[in-house]
Image: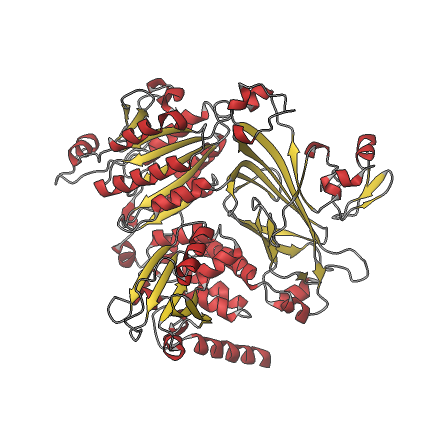
Amino acid sequence: MAVRATMTRFPSDPDAQESSGLPWGITLTPFAGKDENGIAPVYGSDGDLLPRCENCYAYYNTYCDQEQWAWTCALCGNLNGLTSQTISRYSLPHTCAENMSSFIDLELPLEGSEEEAMQARPVYVAAVDLSSSEEFLELTKSALLAALEALGPGSLFGLITFSHKIGLYDVQGPIPVVKNVFIFPESDETTQMELEDVMPLLSFLAPVDTCKDRIASALETLKPTTSWERTTAAGQGLDGVLLGGRGFGVAMEALFSYLGSEYGSTFALARVFAFLSGPPDYGAGQLDTKRYGEQYASKGEDADRALLPEQTPFYKDLAAVAVQSGVCVDIFAVTNEYTDLASLKFLSINSGGSLFLYSNTDDSTLPQDMYRMLSRPYAFNCILRLRTSNEYKSSHSFGHFFPDPQYENVQHIICCDSYATYAYDFEFANDVGFSRHTAELPMIQIAFQYTVVIPPEELPVSGSGLSGSSRSKHSLSRRLRIRTLQFGTAQNINEIYDSVDPEVVLSILVHKVILASLEQGVREGRMLLHDWLPLPRLIFALLRNPLLRFHEEGVHPDYRIYLQCLFSALEPSSLNRAIYPLLTSFTTPDVQAYPRHSLSRAALITSESPIFFLDAFTTLIVFYSSTADSTLPFPPPQDCLLRTVINKLKQERSITPKLIFIRGGQDDATLFENYLIEEQDVDGSGFTSMMGLLSFLDEIKHSVLEYMKY
């Protein structure tokens, strides 16, 4: 559990917070195996026996004062009694994790019988769009074959297709069998029958360890739905124009109902991989893509504001059904046509899944992203709770979760991997702030309750009480991870600035501008940044990012939504790299010249280095200058230092970055030059001019001087 604050010394009162001009909050990566300093939690058992404050319900921790019969809560100061059982337990304090560390991970007892606990198996379902092209299906097949290699033994896998009909595949026999259910074209209708009546769920879900080859054979049978089939099903216009055929909404609704019937019995979590080649345009959940295009120009509407909200609540409501069914949805959109991800995104972000967008099939990293996503550990059925000491509180929470309808500062996360990051914004609960006349310091406690699936080979051999037959099944483990932190307070504004973490500040700002953009449009999101000018370089980079560029500059609305979803889940260092790329140079592929350059053409010229490497998180570019010696190997050889750096970065990323090689003077260098943001305009016009970083800094200096006159 990694926790990072915008400043390690908190402002002492509201006036100090206001005058600092800085956001106040934290970022949190709850399922990270170690904290921000690389320290792992202390593991223990009996999490259900951990004492809790009778006033604020915080958990007992190492910052609490303990007496013989009672303990004082470090967060609210309440005195709590200790039970005789706890007194006996704490008579040997070094045997209890909560007395050894402020970062602990405790086992919790599972509800239900042991046999029910043994029933859990990971379930994965691929939902494939057949209203697509051969190239799309070939890419999807490659991605699913990569996924099969990443899935562990004991996993169950299902294959479903959708177009104007839903196809269910039974791959457990010698020959794949598909049964189809037609979708009604009317937008308020669903399917003719329940999927369970078409094929029993346990016939649909196949064991990966015994059916991998048969699943691969079934994937080879996937073919695009012909235009004749789609036209016949959907009906033709007067001019023979095809009227839809991608019944994605109906397929998802039917699938969630199908899986939900076995939630908690056959599986504790199901992950659905939805592969889309375009917008849903048939049956319930179809989207009107005509709202993108010349429509806004003719009506004088602001496309940057109108295209960001969802056009229908259908998918947000469907996400709630997925959550109730224990289903996490990952959406993989492979398309360059407007698909309205603003409406579709709720299926993924509300269920703890991810949203991926690939503009074409030629250089797509979809197979690598699938393998990477499924190879890393994840937790599910998670509950996240933040508590603070009395003087302040959380004002906003940000991330891919859904808030508890009853309890404040409680979030539910269906699926959470080791990269998933959330953020909290703080404000004072009163006008006094943190008193300078007491010894109490600001406290934060994060409780993260989660479940993991333990494969049979990781179960203890002896002393477990498990029979040989039960050891062949997967086991569930419910755990409670708690982190309690104490922060100092700043005596003056200089102490605040000295303790600032710019990467975390950027994270909080990105969440704020995304929220403002969704509610009031991109222009308002840009205006919000003028309130945070004490961080000029970060603000400069953020203004140049496609996240906040204008529609007329050529930023596709789906790409903007994709960036919103990606950026709002990244930990601070990764987000910082995505917003502000890093440019380094090499004398040769084996010798680094300079670790950092300004993002400008002047840096390329003055450094005299022949090779430059740009890291923009989602894209890695190796650029050879036009004056580079022709004897330098291009591209860099696999065993050189530069390749080692590249491979290390690729391994550390949550997604697979694209690697691009450009030879200056021969190849088109536009993509590389677009990242040289310190030469580009950031004023309200939004179009490139001669204004760069230095001009931007001068304008800020001038504005500050003008402000101070008053």
Lateral position of residue 498 relative to residue 634, left or right:
right
625 over 277 or under it: above or below = below
| Position of the C terminus by quadrant | bottom right
Q: Residue at the location (29% across, 73% down)?
A: 626
The image shows residue 131 at horizontal and vertical percentages of 24, 37
34 over 304 or under it: above or below = above
Q: Residue at the location (37% across, 46% down)?
A: 368
Lateral position of residue 162 relative to residue 348, left or right:
left
Q: Residue at the location (31% across, 73% down)?
A: 628
The image shows residue 133 at horizontal and vertical percentages of 22, 41
Lateral position of residue 556 relative to residue 23, left or right:
left
The image shows residue 33 at horizontal and vertical percentages of 58, 45
The mark tally for this picture is: 0
In this view of the protein, which residue sits in the foreground, 354 or 592? 592
The image shows residue 469 at horizontal and vertical percentages of 53, 18
Q: Quadrant of residue 486?
A: bottom right
Q: Residue at the location (21% across, 38% down)?
A: 243
Q: Quadrant of residue 433?
A: bottom right
In this view of the protein, which residue sits in the foreground, 676 or 184? 676
Say if residue 54 shows up in the picture: no
Residue extending farthest left: 239
Colour mapping used in the image: secondary structure
368 over 328 or under it: above or below = below
Say if residue 42 shows up in the picture: yes
Lateral position of residue 101 relative to residue 374, left or right:
right
